[in-house]
Image: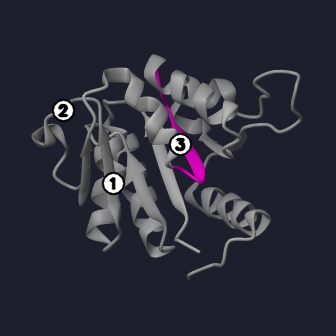
């Protein structure tokens, strides 16, 4: 079984508090031996990639452009798509689990794709955006599962461990 892949989605701009949280989130994911996937650009994507990269983790950036140089410096694997916002489908399809931090319209599309593709989602509520709005919600009435809401890194880890156990994925840590 391949390692669990976690896609982190969220704002392309991050204030210092959000950036710091996301760096620590990336570090946590790397220490859990999880592959970190983002959209490869700035803000939440850069901060998570930086934290994971500095902790020795594998970081993947799936870019909207066709130029590999558009990636942040912390992506070890860079996938230029040339697909624009349509690349959001790829960031989600590559994931076993999706973590949402803040988020605006682009993040909302990724939440929708994640839901359609039955990807478990963890939403960090403390930074507002779509993560806060969708936390604890069902997208529609056809399914009972909800987007899990958390506020802390410990809560992220606990929810990830529950999801991993439920997916019957061996724990590499």
Position of residue 46 measured from the top left corner of the image (x, y, whole percent): 28, 46
Q: Quadrant of residue 82?
A: top left
Q: Earlier in the sequence, mark 3 or mark 2?
A: 2
Placement of the C terminus among the 4 image quadrants = bottom right
Q: CA distance from mark 1 to mark 2?
A: 15 Å
Q: Quadrant of residue 130?
A: top right
* Residue 165 is covered by the magenta coloring: no
| Residue at horizontal 62 percent and vertical 46 percent from the top | 151
Q: CA distance from mark 3 to mark 2?
A: 19 Å
Position of residue 40 measured from the top left corner of the image (x, y, whole percent): 29, 43
With 11 as the anchor, is 140 left or right in this view?
Answer: right
Do the residues bearing badges 3 and 2 touch, measured as CB atoms within 8 Å?
Answer: no
Residue furthest to the top: 105
Disc 1 secondary structure class? strand
Residue furthest to the left: 69
Is 61 located above or below residue 24 in the figure? Answer: above
- In the image, which residues are magenta? 95-104
Residue linked to disc 2 = 66
Residue linked to disc 1 = 60
Residue linked to disc 3 = 93
Crowding around mark 1 (Cα neighbors within 10 Å: few <14, some 14 to 19, many 20+) is many
Q: Earlier in the sequence, mark 1 or mark 2?
A: 1
| Residue at horizontal 65 percent and vertical 23 percent from the top | 133
Q: CA distance from mark 1 to mark 3?
A: 13 Å
Is 39 located above or below residue 116 in the figure? Answer: below
| Residue at horizontal 48 percent and vertical 27 percent from the top | 107
Crowding around mark 2 (Cα neighbors within 10 Å: few <14, some 14 to 19, many 20+) is few
With 157 as the anchor, is 60 left or right in this view?
Answer: left
Is 98 located above or below residue 144 in the figure? Answer: below
């Amino acid at each position: 079984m391949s390692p669990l892949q976690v896609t982190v989605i969220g704002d392309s701009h991050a204030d210092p508090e959000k950036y710091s949280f996301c760096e620590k989130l990336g570090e946590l994911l790397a220490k859990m031996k999880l592959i970190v996937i983002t959209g490869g650009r700035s803000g939440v994507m850069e901060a998570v990639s930086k934290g994971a990269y500095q902790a020795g983790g594998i970081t993947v950036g799936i870019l909207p452009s066709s130029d590999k140089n558009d990636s942040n410096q912390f992506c070890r694997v860079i996938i230029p798509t040339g697909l624009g916002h349509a690349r959001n489908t790829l960031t989600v399809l590559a994931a076993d689990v999706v973590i949402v931090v803040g988020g605006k319209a682009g993040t909302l599309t990724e939440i929708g794709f994640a839901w359609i593709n039955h990807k478990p989602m963890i939403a960090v509520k403390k930074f507002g955006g779509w993560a806060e709005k969708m936390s604890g919600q069902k997208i529609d009435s056809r399914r009972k599962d909800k987007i899990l809401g958390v506020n802390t890194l410990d809560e992220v880890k606990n929810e990830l461990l529950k999801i991993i156990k439920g997916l019957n994925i061996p724990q590499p840590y």
